[in-house]
């Protein structure tokens, strides 16, 4: 495991942070009163938010397994990693193929602190962590540890799981995704989940307001808007669908996923293959 940082390392516990609010919903312990206050405020508008976060996390595991087993891709660039918790990308990937190689990227210093301790690789594979911001993809791509860990001549899975909602349209998320994909060879793939207001616009609008009051940009996207983030790729069957219905694996996800109710988690999910 190597790590590198390009951002200041200052952990401010007085304001809510995206990674720590998500950690709170997942039942983690790496969160503070401000994070829990926002997490609880959001739960008043979406009482099932914890189950929804777990459903998003369960998709991440299914997607990693699918990418290795069905697409034969064993390299991952996982941006917006989150605080390490059960089923991190490298754990799932290296269980399928111990030689899998993973580069994590997150801009939250608390993720960096945990990455050092927790993201241990198998001896056959490799993991690295870059403390950087998705707003600047060239900086991520220029980081020497990226090319030392991933062979950019071979396909890579670009994971943008529950992170693009922090980008408004004026932050050019389509352009950011395109610039990252441009650096990866054909046959690479793009994995995205994105929260949506499509299932309950009123509740989601309250979440937008609560997040912004806490200083966090939160920008849900419609099905069409989420699908448009896959530009330059061929979207793999079943398409961009409610997260619980993307190739559900009831035997593995068990109680976490209720695939019978597509609207039980308000995220769109999909995988596209770079042409
Ligand atoms: C909701 S968590 C998702 C974690 C994981 N991908 C998952 O789905 O389980 C979002 C993560 O994105 C990170 N993040 C938010 N904005 C970012 C940015 N501009 N650059 C890099 N990471 C960012 C947060 O720090 C947080 O760890």
Image (tube, rainbow, N blue to C red):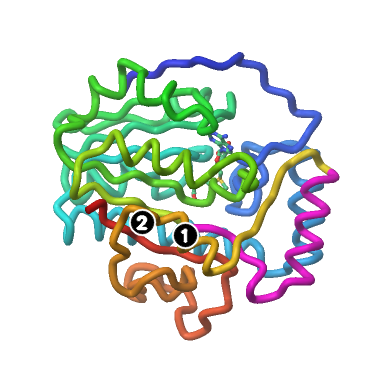
- What segment carries the magenta color? 193-213
Element at label 2: helix
Count of numbered circles in the view: 2
User: Which residue carries the number 1 mark?
Assistant: 228
Residue 155 visible to an observer of this rendering: yes
Instruction: Give whichever of 233, 56 is nearer the camera.
Output: 233
Instruction: Give whichever of 193, 48 is nearer the camera.
Output: 193
Q: Vertically, is 168 above or below 233?
A: above
Which residue shows up at 30% across the image and 53% down it? 64
Quadrant location of residue 70? bottom left
Based on the picture, tell me whether residue 60 belongs to the magenta stretch: no
Left or right position of 200 against 165? right
Distance in Å between CA atoms under marks 1 and 2: 23 Å
Based on the picture, tell me whether residue 201 belongs to the magenta stretch: yes
Element at label 1: helix
Q: Position of residue 234 (x, y in %)?
A: 28, 61
- Looking at the image, is mark 1 or mark 2 nearer the viewer? 1
Which residue shows up at 44% across the image and 72% down it? 241
Q: Position of residue 207 (x, y in %)?
A: 76, 58
The tag on residue 115 is none
Q: Main secondary structure of the magenta part?
A: helix
Left or right position of 41 against 155? right
Residue 51 visible to an observer of this rendering: no
The tag on residue 61 is 2
């Amino acid at each position: 495991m190597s790590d590198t940082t390009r951002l200041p390392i200052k952990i401010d516990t007085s304001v809510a942070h995206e990674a720590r609010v998500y950690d709170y919903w997942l039942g983690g312990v790496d969160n503070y009163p401000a994070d829990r206050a926002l997490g609880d405020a959001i739960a008043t508008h979406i009482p099932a938010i914890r189950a929804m976060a777990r459903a998003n996390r369960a998709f991440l595991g299914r997607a990693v397994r699918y990418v290795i087993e069905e697409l034969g891709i064993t390299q991952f660039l996982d941006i917006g990693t989150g605080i390490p918790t059960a089923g991190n990308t490298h754990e799932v990937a290296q269980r399928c193929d111990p030689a899998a190689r993973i580069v994590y990227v997150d801009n939250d210093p608390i993720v960096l602190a945990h990455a050092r301790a927790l993201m241990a690789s198998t001896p056959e594979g490799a993991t690295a962590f870059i403390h950087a911001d998705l707003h600047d993809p060239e900086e991520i791509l220029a980081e020497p540890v990226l090319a030392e860990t991933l062979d950019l001549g071979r396909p890579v899975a670009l994971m943008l799981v529950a992170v693009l909602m922090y980008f408004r349209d004026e932050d050019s998320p389509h352009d950011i995704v395109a610039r990252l994909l441009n650096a990866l060879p054909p046959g690479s793939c793009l994995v995205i989940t994105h929260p949506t207001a499509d299932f309950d616009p009123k509740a989601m609008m309250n979440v937008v307001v609560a997040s912004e009051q806490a200083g966090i940009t939160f920008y849900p996207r419609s099905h069409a808007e989420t699908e448009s983030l896959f530009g330059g790729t061929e979207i793999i069957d079943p398409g961009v669908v409610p997260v619980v219905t993307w190739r559900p694996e009831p035997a593995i996800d068990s109680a976490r996923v209720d695939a019978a109710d597509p609207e039980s988690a308000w995220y769109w999910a999909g995988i596209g293959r770079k042409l």
